[in-house]
Amino acid sequence: MADTFRLEIVTPAKRLFSKEVTEVQAPGAMGEFGVLAGHTQFTTILAPGVLTYKSGSEAGTLAVGKGYAEVNSERTLLLVDVAETADEIDLDAARSALAESEEAMQTLLPEDPQYMATVDNIELNMTRIRVKEGGR
Amino acid sequence: MPSLKDIKRRIKSVKNTKQITKAMKMVSAAKLKRAQDEITAARPYAASIQELTLSLSSTASPDSHPLLSSKAETNKVAALLLTSDRGLCGSFNAVILRTVERFLRERDASDTNLYLLGRRGVEYFKRSSASILQSRPLGSKRPQYADAVKIAEVVMESFLKGEVKEVYMVYTEFKSALTQRPVAQRILPISTPPAEAENQEAQEKHGIEPIFEPSREALLSSLLPRYVQIQVFKAMLESAASEHGARMTAMDSASKNATQMMGALTLKYNRLRQAAITKELMEIIGGAEALK
């Protein structure tokens, strides 16, 4: 069995990221999971968080938003709202967006329709900051 | 016979028209470029989410999610029609409206609820007896995902309440700046091609048990509304790109026609002027002859 598999990341706004990798760590809704080549069929919801992949000696980190992951033995397909590398993240924008969401959070109740979206927003921006600062 | 002055006025007005069509062509070309980038960026995501949805729903029983099968006992269907807000884009609206007319004829027109998106469609159906679920203009902005979510919610709600049996989407698919194709696509209930199911059976025979997290039902209920939203959004992008493409081609041929017309009019003007000069000369010569 080959020890690499194809990692594909697709977002609505950007072209797909497609690469041969050896290992992926992704933030699932039920907790983080790792994928190696030859993984059994697996489908899950993704939470906003940090995605890391290894391709030989090279490793990469991305901040990903909400989405879905479909894993089979040949490839891992990630369908996410956003996917950004450390270079693409605007730290100031992420910080101000985080502050804004946190402020909005003060007045929201868990029953509000925007509540979950705001929580996801906070998570996403915290992830962005983490990826950016961790990348340095 | 128009006078020299009349022709001159005509030439001037054609020239002005040409300037406008040329400017509109340029604007459309710029907008088309952006719309084309957006649609090419959105297509892989839409295709992937469709693949995922189909592979997930083909193994699930039709009863496992309300969006997968219709329980409505009516024969009513809903159609989401995407037109443009403004005209001057060649046959873009005419073609799509013809498609929807055919769609309505195939079914009983009174059984179809229309959801109209774009002012042209709204105006077209204003005087007809078709039942309109809701209508809204596109607005001058580029297609927004938030709008697609709102539209998807309305049609899904109507479907879930059992008001309609099926939901269709009639829009223009963007092939290139020169070719666009009208399509009528069923979006609800989410269909599962039988070939997919067979495929899945074969896979299950191999003893591979797919894992779903948190569960297949939770995944479906989160994925299916999202799938509908993405389909609507994709249709909006396709339609926007098609509109700009159609307008660009229409304005290009309008500019070409104006140039041709100006040439013909200038020739006529010169001929008429020459005829007038010749006539005057003849008169002078004739007068001089008579004095001899």
Image (tube, rainbow, N blue to C red):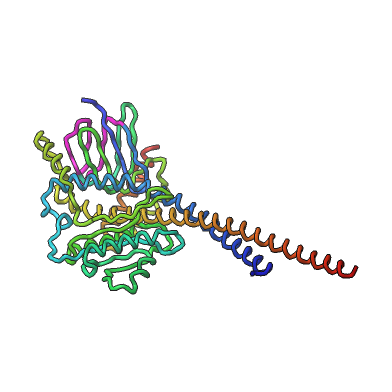
Instruction: Name the residue nearer the viewer: B180 or A57.
Output: B180
Q: Position of residue A109 (x, y in %)?
A: 25, 63
- Lateral position of residue B1 relative to residue B186, left or right: right
**How many numbered circles are shown?**
0
Q: Quadrant of residue B152?
A: bottom left
| Residue drawn at x 16%, y 54% as measured from the top left | B68
Per the rendered image, the range of residues in magenta is A20-43
Q: Main secondary structure of the magenta part?
A: strand
| Residue drawn at x 32%, y 65% as measured from the top left | B116
The answer to whether residue A46 is visible is no
* In the rendered image, the vertical position of residue B108 relative to residue B183, given as above or below: below
The answer to whether residue B140 is visible is yes
Which residue of the protein is positioned furthest toward the right in this rendering?
Answer: B292
Q: Quadrant of residue A37?
A: top left
Q: Position of residue A33 (x, y in %)?
A: 21, 39
Q: Position of residue A36 (x, y in %)?
A: 22, 32
Q: Quadrant of the N terminus of chain B?
A: bottom right
Residue A35 is one of the magenta-drawn residues: yes
Q: Position of residue A131 (x, y in %)?
A: 35, 41
Residue A123 is one of the magenta-drawn residues: no
Q: Quadrant of the C terminus of chain B?
A: bottom right
Instruction: Name the residue nearer the viewer: B212 or B135.
Output: B135
